Amino acid sequence: MTAAPPPTRLQSGQSSETAHLTARARAADAVVEPARRLLGDTHAHLFVTVPPPATAEEALGRLRSLDRAHGGFLAEILLRQRYFEDLIALAVDAGVRQVVLLGAGYDTTALRHTGPGTVRFFEVDHPATQTAKLAALAAADLVSPAVPVPLDLTAGASLRAELTAHGFDVHTPCVVGWLGVTFFLPPEACRATLAELADTVAPGSLLLFDYMDEAVVDGTSPWEGALRMARQVRELGEPYVNGLTADTAATTARDAGFEPVEHLRVTDLVRRYGGTDPYCSDDDFMGLVAARRTGREASGHGE
Ligand SMILES: C[S@@+](CC[C@H](N)C(=O)[O-])C[C@H]1O[C@@H](n2cnc3c(N)ncnc32)[C@H](O)[C@@H]1O
């Protein structure tokens, strides 16, 4: 008989440390000289647990050393977000007024959407991480316009019921970002979340999610830096438990009712956004899928 795995960090009521790691990368990138920045998240520094670099040179040094240890991660963390913000901008131009972040972590997109306040952001996250985020915002005397929706995606609660209880409109299209999360959810919770999402968002809605290669999760990947990160997050109590491939990521989306419209690997992201001299490498062990909700409006329940 195999022993049950130890409780994860979140299961034991602690906020996500990997969410801090991604905020740390964004905060360092924001200090890099403007022409070389990959993203430009001016609020990420509010959520870091070590002080952000003081100079552009120090920022590049820190980012390069992270990149040497875990090639591909910086590109994925920063550029999936860049893609997401482009996707939101296009959708808003086309009239979309709702954005959902699943496993929002310390995402600050809502804080930067300060134009005419017509876009509503809903940030779904595990209550432990969400509490930590709200405390950091309060400490900085900031109120995010985002609506917090505390929800453990492994607990079997209805995403549709939770979102509608917080004012989400299931009848108008939205953009959903599910970034840096699928690999932390057991496969059945990942599929259930996708099914719930399909039951929640109106046809035409766009979903952006990223996935980790199965080979990283099962330890057979040729990418050493990825395997090193897998060991590190396991030690933090947030193990990777769900790997996909380019094929299974697309079919998983399709099976749930989302038709992929674009599928980018880390290499593609760097080629698109990295400029002529990107400061990060493109080890290719993750992918990003943009998919559109097909079909007719779900019949609905839980409202
Ligand atoms: C690596 S962080 C990514 C955060 C953010 N999306 C980003 O890109 O920086 C993973 C996020 O998933 C959330 N998460 C992990 N397991 C979860 C669960 N069972 N229910 C809800 N959120 C979860 C964590 O709280 C954390 O915010």
Image (spheres, rainbow, N blue to C red):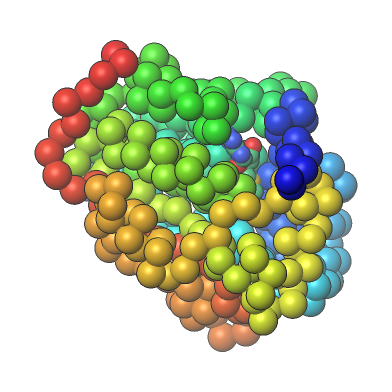
Q: Which residue is rendered at x = 42% and y = 45% of the image?
A: 191
Left or right: 2 in relation to 298: right
Give the position of the C terminus as an image quadrant. top left
Residue that protrudes farthest toward the front in the picture: 1
Q: Quadrant of residue 49?
A: top right
Q: Quadrant of residue 137?
A: top right
Q: Position of residue 169 (x, y in %)?
A: 28, 24
Closer-to-camera residue (267/64):
267
Q: Is residue 25 left or right of residue 263?
A: right
Residue lying furthest bottom: 276
Q: Residue furthest left?
A: 296
x%, y% of residue 292? 26, 52
- Image location (x, y in percent) of residue 35: 61, 72
**Residue 46 in view (yes/no):** no
Q: Residue sitting at 31 percent across and 16 percent down?
A: 302
Question: Is 22 above or below relative to 5?
Answer: below
Front one among 34 and 154: 154
Observer-nearest of 253 and 59 = 253
Residue occupying the point 34% across, 30% down: 118
Most foreground residue, 183 or 207: 183
Question: 128 left or right of 69?
Answer: left
Residue 158 in the image: x percent, y percent?
Answer: 41, 24
